[in-house]
Image: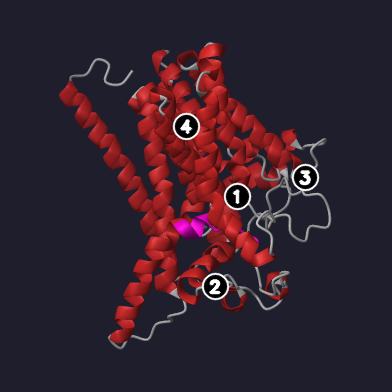
Amino acid sequence: MAGAGLSRSDALKAERRREQGLLLLFALCVLTFVASIPLPRADGHLIGSDGAFYYAYLPSLLLDGDLDFRNQYERSLPPDHPARSRISPTGIVPNPYPMGPALLWSPFFLVAHGLTQALRAGGTSLPADGYGPLYEGVTLLASMLYGFMALWMLYRLAARWFDPSAAWAAVVLLWFAGNAVYYMVAEPSMAHMTAMFAAALFFRCWLIARARDRGGDWLGLGAAGGLMLLVRPADAIFLIGPFVDRLLGRPLREALRGLPARALAFAGAAILVFLPQALAWGWMYGDLRQSSYLYGATEPLFRWTSPRMLEVLFSSWHGLFTWHPIYAFAVLGLAWAARRDRPLALALAAGFLAQVYLIGAWRDWTQGDAFGGRMFLSAMPAFVFGLSALLEALRRRGWLRPALAIGLLLILWNGLFMVQYRFGFIPMSASLTFRQLVIEKFLLPLELLRRLR
């Protein structure tokens, strides 16, 4: 456990070094992102792909004061993009993506707007419509910060259960051997960093509610769950976790005592926080219940009776374990985590399996253009908990150094994978051959040198 064999002073020094290490790694990510800003981009914007839709809420709501995205799409989407010509029943151009990321980014966007106004007043020519490097750069740095806050939060939580050095190593390996580093540095305009933050905050509130079991704690847990839905509605699947944990962790009669009132407080807070999204749907589609994901769908979005669960995990087309084996070790580690806290580990495992089922049932189970299983970043609490337990168990058996050596190889594998993916050596949305997946990684330095020449 934490601090075993160390004096309090030595334990505090070790903790300070670990925290400084995390800050240095984040600074490295920020420097890499900033250095990439001058690079040419296909659409001329820092924000692209799905991020254009998440970001569009900011200038539309905060500067235009409406939810008609016509002018935002004219600014940020190609002329032939179908979203530019889609008209809702209320006569406006709607946004099919949730507003949660924009709400989390909004304080930073307003700071960028204030700076822009001040610079313009001083004679500097800058766009004031919510676009441009200052607006977009500050917002994307905020997205990176949310991702880091999630990892920091999960490290601190895991260190309460497991050896802090094992928890620290788990977070670093999941950060750099998984796809979190890609969506933090290369595509921070996607929702995944804010989704990871919302999931980490929900997990923290979950642990508070299970420890103190007060009505106010369940209100806070519900509010965190509502935020999770605002950012990514599909993450509603994790809301059942605290209830599974409660029913498994106590005698049934004790678990049920007071549960209806707590569930009501939980649900009420979640609905209240999610209400802005429902109101936005009502404004755009004339119906508070009309999800943007379902509007206009001509075929079922989910195939509930034939989910592609094995493919989601093992396919060469963005398979979670195939692209990033570190996640397989993390899920395996939940078996060791169950020895420390069986109800919590089982609840986390159930949430992960439910997510595998949900993604597998979705018609686009390959997750579009994706660097691996990008939708699983919301399951980071389960991954950190599981990998921390596994590394602690390996340390007790004297196998930590070989395990960390494998971890470093996985980080190298991931770094080569990022270069392959980002610079077009492999397709972004297709199944990979064995040669692309494995062999070409070893040939990549030679290929890069050839292209430079």
Residue 416 shows up from this direction? no
Viewer-closest of 282 and 104: 282
On the image, the x and y values in percent for residue 293 come to 69, 55
Verify whether residue 101 appears in magenta.
Answer: yes
Inter-mark Cα distance, 3 to 4? 29 Å
Neighbor class of circle 4 (other Cα within 10 Å; few <14, some 14-19, many 20+) is many
The numbered mark, 4 or 2, whose residue comes first in the sequence reads 2
Amino acid at circle 3: Phe
- Up the image or down, 90 lies above or below 379; here it is below
The numbered mark, 1 or 2, whose residue comes first in the sequence reads 2
Amino acid at circle 1: Phe
The numbered mark, 1 or 4, whose residue comes first in the sequence reads 1
Quadrant in the rendering for residue 346: top right
The residue pinned by badge 3 equals 302
Residue 124's mark?
none
Foreground label between 3 and 2: 2
- Up the image or down, 340 lies above or below 277; here it is above
Residue 371's mark?
1
Inter-mark Cα distance, 1 to 4? 20 Å
- Up the image or down, 60 lies above or below 237; here it is below
Amino acid at circle 4: Val
The residue pinned by badge 4 equals 384
Which stretch is magenta? 96-103
Tags 1 and 4 touching, CB below 8 Å: no
The residue pinned by badge 2 equals 66
